[in-house]
Amino acid sequence: VTRLVLVLGDQLSTDIAALREADKGSDVVVMAEVMDEASYVRHHPKKIAFLFAAMRKFAARLRDDGWQVAYSRLDDEGNSQSIPGELLRRADEFDAKEVLATEPGEWRLISALEDMPIPVHQFQDTRFIASHKEFEDWADGRKQLRMEYFYRDMRRKTGLLMDGDKPEGGKWNYDHDNRKPAPDEVDFGGPMQFTPDDTVEQVLDLVEARFGNSFGDLRPFWFATDQGQARRQLTHFIKNALPKFGDFQDAMMNDNRFLYHGLISFYLNAGLLDPLEVCRAAEEAYQAGDAPINAVEGFIRQIIGWREYIRGIYFLEGPDYPRRNALNHQRGLPDFYWGAETRMNCIAKAVEQTREEAYAHHIQRLMVTGNFALLAGINPTEVHEWYLAVYADAYEWVEAPNTVGMSQFADGGIVASKPYVSSGAYINRMSDYCKSCHYSVSAKTGEKACPFNLLYWNFLNRHRDRFENNPRMGQMYRTWDRMDEDRRETVLAEGDAFLHKLNGSEVV
Ligand code: FAD
Ligand code: DLZ
Ligand code: SF4
């Protein structure tokens, strides 16, 4: 009997669980470009093009490998435009009575598959290092879910950078040596860029016609769209950028969008690269003496530490997680997140590059756009929907805990033990943004005062009850309390005035 094998757009690996369970001789692989997935948020056109192109190439590869693939293009007549709809249509067509699937990375789709009128077996996604059960066991009984301890378990489990049962070099974490400010010059030319082939060009035309009005530039399009290309980008990064990845991981520059970052999250999350393959390549560079321990440990920690931990939180916390709003923030997302003019250079730069590349690196997401949204009290659900839409690596399992938890503190402190807020001083230290800004980062009040400076105190003051007794924040409250009362009043009044202007027509 024929069974259907569902492969979603972010499951493009020949090792994916459902394919491993399936029988090439009798089962039919179902892949579908559908409006339901392409429109649950207004995805960046580059994100849609990347996925559709990678899906089409992956389907071709499966056919070459001998699989029968039923592939629905977005414009195909009869396309029901939903994943369950396409499964039912194909079940009819092939007289199939059951479906093999790999668990999707979003609760919405998991329950849609559970609710299907035919049986759907959802196999655990084995592309991750920790299973749900392992993460639950680790979390069980802990008061605080600190990434660092989970990460050490993942080091032990994978053997990455281990010297017997000890961490390589004697320390688990070399962050102390990282986080240098922006360098004067970057001696790395950025990620490998791929010229669109015929498949990609066809997809670009489709996406232009159907999604051309969404926020985000479709062209120039340079992403890798198959495993071979993604591996070339990985090799390029390991050889040319990894050695300095650690040093400048948190730096930001007006004229350099990529610094020494990997630009691999799109490929990892879609299945074109495997996390262990990526980490082993970095480890080899360390063993060969081509990259220092602080860079390699830092990089591996992002993948087997943060990435796995974030996923663990998403599945541990359940479907309501993306809607949490512990700080009860209700302000609407300002238009400048969608490209409207702003005089804040750091935000303008982060949004401009997001529009052009569907990419921003971690500190831009966390300490510029995220920091501002948190300081200004923007509704975290709106912030979440923005991040889910605009980045080509965004799927709910990874985006929501990063946004709602780490960045907006809307989970009440599960991911972050204190809110990631800072005044302009942090941005000034880590970037060259402030030099070309309308505002003055050294001005604490007055017309030119950097809005991050004003809103920082405004935020601490508004949430005093919650954070005053947080041991990592007490110092800030003491600084605030020591300020002149007049000055405090001016700061608060100017902060309020700024917030008042935020959703109006005046450019801020
Ligand atoms: P590098 O800096 O080169 O890091 C290497 C890899 O480490 C990344 O490719 C990624 O796979 C992994 N990684 C690093 N940090 C994290 C993290 N916090 N969570 C998960 N993986 C991590 N990452 C996504 O993949 N998808 C998202 O939708 C996403 N949304 C985010 C939203 C916010 C508000 C914040 C603060 C962070 C978000 N991140 C997200 C994490 C991080 O910003 C990106 O993984 C990273 O910028 C990807 O670029 P890169 O490949 O150049 O990463
Ligand atoms: C993000 C996305 C988009 C834009 N389009 C499709 C699609 O047409 N077909 C598909 O199978 N998957 C798509 N995806 C990825 C899914 O939304 C993703 O599998 C879920 O969000 C779970 O991670
Ligand atoms: Fe951003 Fe303030 Fe610096 Fe301007 S001065 S770039 S608003 S941190």
Image (cartoon, rainbow, N blue to C red):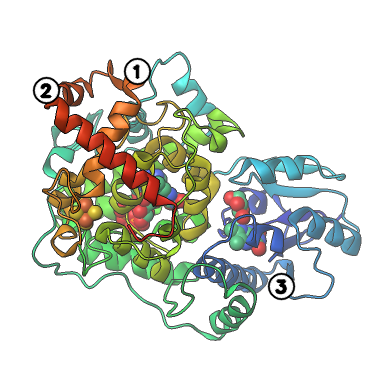
Q: Where is ligand 3, by quadrant?
A: bottom left
Indicate which label's residue lies in the foreground, 2 or 3: 2
Residue located at (87% from left, 44% from top):
117
Q: Position of residue 342 (x, y in %)?
A: 33, 62
Do residues under tags 2 and 1 come within 8 Å of each other at their CB atoms? no
Residue located at (56% from left, 79% from top):
204
Q: Quadrant for residue 177, please give it.
A: top left
Cα separation between marks 2 and 1? 18 Å
Indicate which label's residue lies in the foreground, 2 or 1: 2
Q: Is residue 82 left or right of residue 449?
A: right
Q: Is residue 56 left or right of residue 291?
A: right
Cα separation between marks 1 and 3? 54 Å
Earlier along the polypeptide chain: callout 2 or callout 1?
1
Disc 2, SS: helix
Q: Position of residue 109 (x, y in %)?
A: 68, 46
Q: Position of residue 148 (x, y in %)?
A: 30, 30
Disc 1, SS: helix
Residue located at (81% from left, 57% from top):
85
Disc 3, SS: loop
Which residue is label 1 attached to? 465
Name the mark on residue 73: 3
| Residue type at the position of mark 1 | Asp
- Report if residue 160 is visible in the image: no
Q: Nearer the viewer, residue 217 or 87?
A: 217
| Residue type at the position of mark 3 | Arg
Q: Position of residue 15 (x, y in %)?
A: 56, 54
| Residue type at the position of mark 2 | Arg
Name the mark on residue 482: 2
Q: Nearer the viewer, residue 17 or 343?
A: 343
Earlier along the polypeptide chain: callout 2 or callout 3?
3
